[in-house]
Structure formats: C-alpha cells, structure tokens
Amino acid sequence: MEAQEIPHQPASRGIPSESLSVGYSPPEPPSAEDAPSPLLAAERTSIRRSSAGCSTSFSQLTMSPCVSPEKKDLPREAPKLGEGGNWQCHFCLNVNYPRRTVCNRCMTERSKENTQRVSEFMRLKEGFLSMGLDSAALVESPPVLLPVHHTMDQ
C-alpha cells in the first residue's frame, strides 16, 4: 500500500501544521551495533545531571547522583611576593610559585638569584618541618624578631 499525502492544514488541537503521511510509523530504536559512543553517553549523563540540579564537569562523571565541587575546582589565589618562597620574574615582574622554574606569564627562566632564594627558603622550610612545625605555620606566622644586644661604648 502506498502512503498518501494529507493536504496542508492549519494546526489545531495538537495536530502539526505540516502535511502528514498516512501509514507513518516512528523510527526503530537503535540496535546494539548503533549504540552511541561512550563520549556521547557521558555527555547525555552530564545533561541529565545538570537538569536535575547537579553541576558536574566531564571529568567528574560517576555513577553517584551528584558530585560536590572539589577544592581543586575553586579559583586559586595568585602567589604573593614574600610568601612561601614565591619569586618575581625580572623580565615581566610576575610573581611565581617556588615550584616553577620558568615564569608562567612570559616563560623566562628563573634567575640564579631567584633560584638561590627559593633554595634557601626550601632549606629553612625543611628545618622547620624537622622540628615538628607544619608548613602552614611557616607561611602564616609573622616573622620572628630576634632581640638585639646593645653594648655601651665608653
């Protein structure tokens, strides 16, 4: 039997305005061979979660209903000069963490002077840690002022 066209009619009561074919059937569901790729399935999972009120990134997709944001996902504060062995690039004046051997802004190598400062800081840090102080105390505590002994010259 050949499909017959129904002429175009205005939409009314939920009937679409396009012409319909008599004998139309919905498409077959996909077979196992036509299954979507794992990436597409993960993206669909992400979309379902976002519509359920959960915010996730692609790397956080798991079988749990919602993934809470991890600390590493929060914005990081920029390094400050004079804290924790941070060093300043001589070329662009950007402040870098001590673990960086090149400036993260201009890619200039860390100077010998800054390398010596970082090495000295790390040596002092290891000394404090060996005395039982934690690294947070080292960064957060104010500098210790040693008493100055005065002598009277006559």
Image: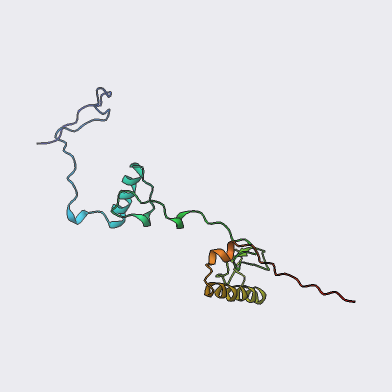
Measured as percent of width and height from the top left, residue 23 is found at 14, 35
**Residue found farthest to the right:** 154
Image color mode? rainbow
Indicate left or right for 61 with 137 as reference: left
Nearer the observer, 148 or 130 = 148
Residue drawn at x 48%, y 53% as measured from the top left:
74
Measured as percent of width and height from the top left, residue 142 is found at 64, 62
Q: Is residue 40 above or below residue 148?
A: above
Measured as percent of width and height from the top left, residue 58 is found at 37, 54
Q: How many marks?
A: 0
Q: Quadrant of residue 147?
A: bottom right
- Image quarter (top left, top right, bottom left or bottom right) of the C terminus: bottom right
Measured as percent of width and height from the top left, residue 76 is found at 53, 56
State whether residue 126 appears in this view: yes
Q: Quadrant of residue 51?
A: top left
Nearer the observer, 35 or 74 = 74
State whether residue 104 appears in this view: no
- Image quarter (top left, top right, bottom left or bottom right) of the N terminus: top left
